[in-house]
C-alpha cells in the first residue's frame, strides 16, 4: 500500500557556485552577473552586480590605463588620453609601435627623471614625462625579447625575457639596462612568462615554475643585479599566461600551469601558494581552446560594494569567470552587446577617487571608459542578464513531491518588477516555460508548481532595478511514493 508524505516547507537557495560536469555551462549550477553575501537571520543573499556607464568618447582598440603623477590616462589605438571623468583631454600618440593594438601595463609615478613607464604585450617599453613618450631602445633590453610585465623595486625596473632571464635597469632609469644586470633560476623552469612585484619581492614566472627574489643589495654569482632568490620560495607551478597575473590587496592571483596536472587558479599570499580553483573551474580552464601563447585572455581585480573580485576573462570560450575573494565563490559575468550576450566587455581596472564612484574599466568592444557604478542597474552596452541556476534538488528522497506553492524572500521592488522562474525535471535538457513572480507584492509567490522527484530551478532577471534575493520557500504536499 502506498504511503503519503506529510506537508513540508522546504527551501531553495539561488546562491550556488559554478558546477559543471563537462567544462561547459550548459548544465548544472551557476550564477551569472550576481554574487553572494551571508546575511544574519536570512541565510545567503544573491545580489545583482553593479551596472556601467560610459565616461569617455574616444573609440578604437582598448589598451589599458596608467597614471602620471596621480592623474589617470587611458590608451586607445596606441594613443593616450588624459582622463578627468567624464571628460578627456587631447590624445598623445605612442611612437614607434611595432605591432599596433597591444594591451599595456605600467609602472606609475616613480622617482625622477621619469615618472611613468609603460610596456605593451610585445615587451616594448616607453617612458612618459607628462607630454611625450620616448621608446626604450637599449640593445641590452630589446635584444633579449622581454615578455609582457614590468616590475619596480627599490629604484630598479625588472623584466622577464623569453629565455628566462630576469633583467634589471639602471637606478631609476628605465632607458638603460646594464648588460650584467640579470639573473636566472637555478632550476629548469622552461621559458619566461612575466615578472611582477609582490609585497617587497620580485616574482619571476616561468611556464613550469615560479622563483621569488628579494633585494639583497648585492651582486649574486658575479652578475650586477641586486636580487637574490628566496630559497624557501621556489615553486613548480608556473604561470599559464602573463595577462592572468593580478595583484589584489597584497595578494597575487594567476592561472597556474604544471606539465603533469594542468591549469588551476592560484594565489600567493605572503610566500604561501594556495589553489583557489575547484574541479569545476579546472574543467573549464583545461579546455584545449585556451593556448599558452594567446594574448586574448586577461584578468584584473576590482573592489566594490565591500567585495573584492578576481575577474578572469576567457574570450576564446566566450566566458568570464569571477572569483569573489570575500566568499571564495566562483560565478560568471557577462555583457549584452548589440543584443547578444557574450563575455564581460571590461578589461583593466582604474581606481580614481576624484569621482563619485571611482571604479573604472575599459570596454574592449569600443575602447571607451566604463564607470562601474553601484547606483546603476544596467550596462552601457545593454541589459544585465542576471541568471541563477540551481543544482538538482531532491531533499534526500526520490519520492514524488508536489510543489503546492513557492514564495520568494527578497527586497520589495517597484510596481512592474518581475523575475522569471522555470524548472527542469530532465537534468537540464529542457526547461519549462518561465512563470513570473511580481516582486512589488508582499507575498512574492507562485502556486500550483507541478510535481517531481528531482528538479533544478532557473531564475532570470533583466530589469533596470537592483535585485537582492534570499531563499525561495517551497510548500510541498504529500503524494504517493
Image (tube, rainbow, N blue to C red):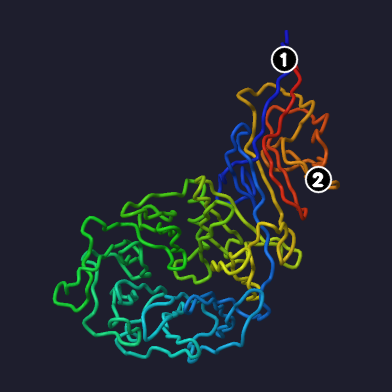
Residue 282, percent from left and from top: 48, 51
Q: Is residue 476 above or below residue 144?
A: above
Residue at the farthest right position: 416
Q: Quadrant of residue 226?
A: bottom left
Q: Residue at x 62, y 84 (%)?
A: 89
Residues 304 and 430: in front is 304
Q: Is residue 429 above or below residue 82?
A: above
User: On the rendered structure, is 221 left or right of 367?
Assistant: left
User: On the rendered structure, is 473 left or right of 200?
Assistant: right
Residue at the farthest left position: 222
Name the quadrant of the N terminus: top right
Residue 148, percent from left and from top: 42, 74
Q: Is residue 123 above or below residue 202?
A: below
Q: Which SS class for mark 2?
A: strand
Q: Which SS class for mark 1?
A: loop
**Camera sees residue 435:** no
Q: Residue at x 43, y 62 (%)?
A: 247
Q: Residue at x 70, y 23 (%)?
A: 9
Residue 331, percent from left and from top: 58, 50
**Camera sees residue 69:** yes
Residues 461 and 174: in front is 174
Give the number of the mark in front: 2 or 1.
Answer: 2
Q: Residue at x 53, y 46 (%)?
A: 329
Other-residue count near label 1 (Cα within 10 Å), few / some / many at <14 / 14–19 / ≥20? few
Are discs 2 and 1 less than 8 Å apart at CB? no
The residue that mark 2 highlights is: 418
Q: CA distance from mark 2 to mark 1?
A: 31 Å
Residue 155, percent from left and from top: 30, 76
Q: Is residue 419 above or below residue 77?
A: above
Which mark, residue 314? none
Which mark, residue 6? 1
Amino acid at each position: 500500500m502506498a504511503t503519503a508524505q506529510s506537508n513540508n516547507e522546504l527551501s531553495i537557495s539561488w546562491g550556488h557556485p559554478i558546477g559543471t560536469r563537462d567544462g561547459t555551462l550548459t548544465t548544472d549550477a551557476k550564477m551569472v552577473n550576481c554574487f553572494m553575501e551571508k546575511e544574519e537571520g536570512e541565510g545567503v543573499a544573491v545580489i545583482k552586480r553593479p551596472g556601467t556607464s560610459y565616461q569617455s568618447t574616444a573609440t578604437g582598440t582598448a589598451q589599458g590605463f596608467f597614471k602620471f603623477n596621480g592623474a589617470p590616462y587611458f590608451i586607445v589605438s596606441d594613443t593616450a588620453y588624459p582622463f578627468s571623468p567624464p571628460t578627456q583631454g587631447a590624445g598623445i600618440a605612442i611612437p614607434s609601435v611595432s605591432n599596433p593594438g597591444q594591451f599595456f601595463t605600467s609602472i606609475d609615478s616613480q622617482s625622477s627623471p621619469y615618472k611613468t613607464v609603460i610596456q605593451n604585450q610585445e615587451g616594448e617599453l616607453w617612458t612618459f614625462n607628462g607630454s611625450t613618450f620616448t621608446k626604450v631602445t637599449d640593445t641590452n633590453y630589446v635584444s633579449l625579447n622581454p615578455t609582457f610585465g614590468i616590475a619596480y623595486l627599490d629604484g630598479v625596473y625588472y623584466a622577464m625575457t623569453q629565455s628566462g632571464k630576469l633583467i634589471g635597469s639602471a637606478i631609476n632609469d628605465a632607458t638603460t639596462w646594464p648588460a650584467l644586470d640579470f639573473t636566472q633560476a637555478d632550476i629548469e623552469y622552461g621559458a619566461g612568462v612575466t615578472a611582477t612585484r609582490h609585497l617587497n619581492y620580485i616574482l619571476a614566472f616561468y611556464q613550469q615554475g615560479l622563483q621569488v627574489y628579494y633585494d639583497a643589495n648585492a651582486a649574486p654569482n658575479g652578475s650586477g643585479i641586486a636580487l637574490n632568490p628566496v630559497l624557501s620560495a621556489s615553486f613548480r607551478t608556473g604561470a599559464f599566461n602573463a595577462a592572468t597575473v593580478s595583484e589584489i590587496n597584497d595578494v597575487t592571483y594567476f592561472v597556474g600551469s604544471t606539465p603533469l596536472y594542468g591549469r588551476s587558479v592560484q594565489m600567493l599570499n605572503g610566500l604561501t601558494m594556495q589553489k583557489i580553483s575547484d574541479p569545476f573551474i579546472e574543467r573549464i580552464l583545461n579546455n584545449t581552446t585556451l593556448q599558452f601563447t594567446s594574448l586574448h585572455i586577461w584578468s584584473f581585480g576590482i573592489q566594490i560594494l565591500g567585495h573584492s573580485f578576481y575577474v578572469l576573462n576567457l574570450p576564446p570560450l566566450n566566458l568570464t569567470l569571477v572569483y569573489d575573494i570575500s566568499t571564495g565563490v566562483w560565478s560568471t559575468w557577462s555583457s549584452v552587446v548589440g543584443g547578444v550576450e557574450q563575455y564581460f566587455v571590461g578589461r583593466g581596472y582604474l581606481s580614481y577617487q576624484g569621482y563619485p564612484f571611482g571604479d573604472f574599466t575599459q570596454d574592449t568592444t569600443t575602447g571607451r571608459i566604463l564607470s562601474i557604478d553601484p547606483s546603476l542597474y544596467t550596462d552601457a552596452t545593454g541589459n544585465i542578464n542576471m541568471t541563477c541556476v540551481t543544482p538538482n534538488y531532491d531533499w534526500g528522497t526520490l519520492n514524488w513531491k508536489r510543489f503546492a506553492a513557492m514564495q520568494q524572500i527578497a527586497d520589495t521592488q517597484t510596481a512592474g518588477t518581475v523575475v522569471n522562474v522555470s524548472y527542469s525535471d530532465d537534468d537540464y535538457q529542457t526547461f519549462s516555460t518561465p512563470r513570473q513572480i511580481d516582486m512589488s507584492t508582499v507575498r512574492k509567490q507562485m502556486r500550483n508548481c507541478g510535481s517531481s522527484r528531482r528538479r533544478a530551478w532557473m531564475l532570470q532577471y533583466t530589469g533596470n532595478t537592483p535585485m537582492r534575493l534570499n531563499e525561495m520557500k517551497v510548500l510541498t504536499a504529500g503524494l504517493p511514493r
